[in-house]
Image (cartoon, rainbow, N blue to C red):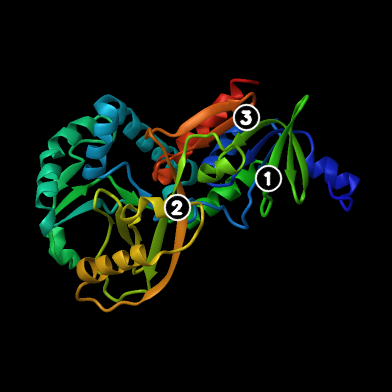
Amino acid sequence: MPNELSYWEKESFFCNYDAIVIGSGIVGLNAAIHLKKTVPSLRIVILEKGFLPTGASTKNAGFACFGSISELTEQEKRMGSERLAMLIEKRWKSLLKLRYLLGDNTIDYQCLGGYELFKKEDHSLAELGVSKIEHFNLLVNDIVGSNAFRVNNKKISLSGFEGVSTLIENQYEAQIDSGKMMYALIQYAQQLGIGIFNNCTVDRIEEESKGFCLITKNGNFSCKQLILTTNAFIKDLYPDVDINPGRGQVLITRPIKNLKIAGTFHYDKGYYYFRNINNRILLGGGRNIDFKAEQTTTFGHTEPVQSALERLLKKVILPTTKYEIDYRWSGIMAFGKTLEPHIEEIRPNVFCATRCNGMGVAIGSQTGEDVANLLLNKL
């Protein structure tokens, strides 16, 4: 531990935590909040390697969604109808938890509907999607409500899209402001007495007789139990965890006068996504162009993906509207062989919650609560 730390600093800021959460994203914050609300006497701190939450929580598109028709069709092939229904229920209930905890106004929750685009050349995929509407309406009826999906081709011309033949609407899909959500979660955690230390990277974890010592350049932290919610970055500390990173590249336009587009939109089985935000278009995706290149924890942009995003923006989304791209960013997600989040005690008293499979906004609150409950069961 650095010599410049005082006795008071060591004792009050670095020692004797009941639990430390590594990662201050949506999952980590919800885990800490659930721990503290359940057992208020617990001494909890969150360590975050970035100045702001690093990864995807403040880098995503702010979709409050549980899956488009094409996404659900692909997911059903992998896990079957029963498991998919259970996963959709987790996503939906998790969104309800988030809304209840922070309030719709706080996170700028707007239920403007979600829409899946099918271009004219995607005729067979569109036909399959339309044929699945009744099936998925029945599947989610008791979870989110009746008649979730329907064809709404009127919105194609109303939105000014070019080359789109079919639009499938999900009336229960909404959008949030991810920045406001994360700011509010941080404030909520701090009001409960949870400490959050930023710019504090955990370099390694050492087991001790009564818990763990977390080695950082700022000093060494001690705790009895540990929760890792660093998502794709978990391999930095525990390389054997079964996840694969996935980079999502995003761009946003400058404000556009009289923007017609309102809602959240999916294209190409959800690999592309866009929405309106403050008279701008936020557009992301394209990692399916080169899965290998985008399977990285390195932030940044690539020419093939950015070109694909710009083509979609110019030819389909805003074909007759003048616009300027303001700036670009990227976020790092985590994926795996199974679609459920990876929530596990990976070592005695070391718990992980990772692999939200691109659905962190939807399932992050529940995932945080679930991993917290694993720890609470050991108290």
Q: Which residue is mark 3?
A: 350
Q: Which residue is mark 2?
A: 107
Q: Which residue is mark 1?
A: 202
How far across and how far down the image is residue 90, in percent?
38, 32
10 Å crowding of disc 3: few (<14), some (14-19), many (20+)? some
Residue 276 lies, with reference to residue 109, above or below; the image says below
> Quick check: 351 left or right of 273?
right
Find the distance from the CA under tag 1 to the CA under tag 2: 30 Å
Q: Nearer the viewer, residue 13 or 356?
A: 356
10 Å crowding of disc 2: few (<14), some (14-19), many (20+)? many
For discs 3 and 2, the disc positioned in front in the rendered view: 3
Q: Nearer the viewer, residue 186 or 238?
A: 238
Secondary structure of residue under mark 2: helix
Residue 14, by quadrant, is: top right
> Quick check: 258 left or right of 95?
left
Amino acid type of the residue tagged 1 in the rendering: Val
Whether label 3 touches label 1, CB < 8 Å: no
Q: Quadrant of the C terminus?
A: top right
